[in-house]
Image: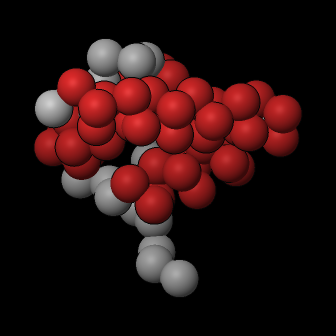
Amino acid sequence: MSKTPKFSPAHIDDIIQMALSDHVSFQDIRREYGILEKDVKALMRDNLKSGSYRAWRKRVRDFGDRREMYK
């Protein structure tokens, strides 16, 4: 398992807000914070309630599937 960088609570809040947004990609988060997609998912899993995390993952997966059709 990779080591996720330690972030301040303010940066964690920013990353969570970016990840929850439908308009920000994992690549955008990586550019700004240098954190990989799998690490964003781990951060979200650690900081969201389990039901909220599952709903977020479903939304990200569904949005990604729809996005592929429009490319």
Q: Residue at (21%, 35%) from the top-left corner?
A: 28
Quadrant into which the C terminus falls: top left
Q: Residue at (32%, 54%) from the top-left corner?
A: 35
Q: Nearer the viewer, residue 50 or 71?
A: 71
Judge whether 63 appears above or below 23 on screen: below
Q: From where the camera sits, is residue 11 visible?
A: no
Residue 63 is drawn in which quadrant? top left
Image position, residue 69 (x, y; %): 29, 32
Image check: 53 left or right of 3? right
Q: Residue furthest front?
A: 69
Image position, residue 7 (x, y; %): 44, 47
Image position, residue 26 (x, y; %): 31, 42
Judge whether 20 appears above or below 36 on screen: above
Image position, residue 17 (x, y; %): 47, 21
Image check: 54 left or right of 42? right
Residue 64 is drawn in which quadrant? top left
Q: Residue furthest bottom?
A: 1
What colour scheme was applied to this rendering of the protein? secondary structure
Q: Residue at (38%, 54%) from the top-left corner?
A: 37
Q: From where the camera sits, is residue 2 visible?
A: yes
**Image label count:** 0
Q: Nearer the viewer, residue 29 or 62?
A: 62
Q: Residue at (53%, 82%) from the top-left corner?
A: 1
Image check: 43 left or right of 2? right
Judge whether 9 appears above or below 35 on screen: above
Q: Nearer the viewer, residue 14 or 36?
A: 36
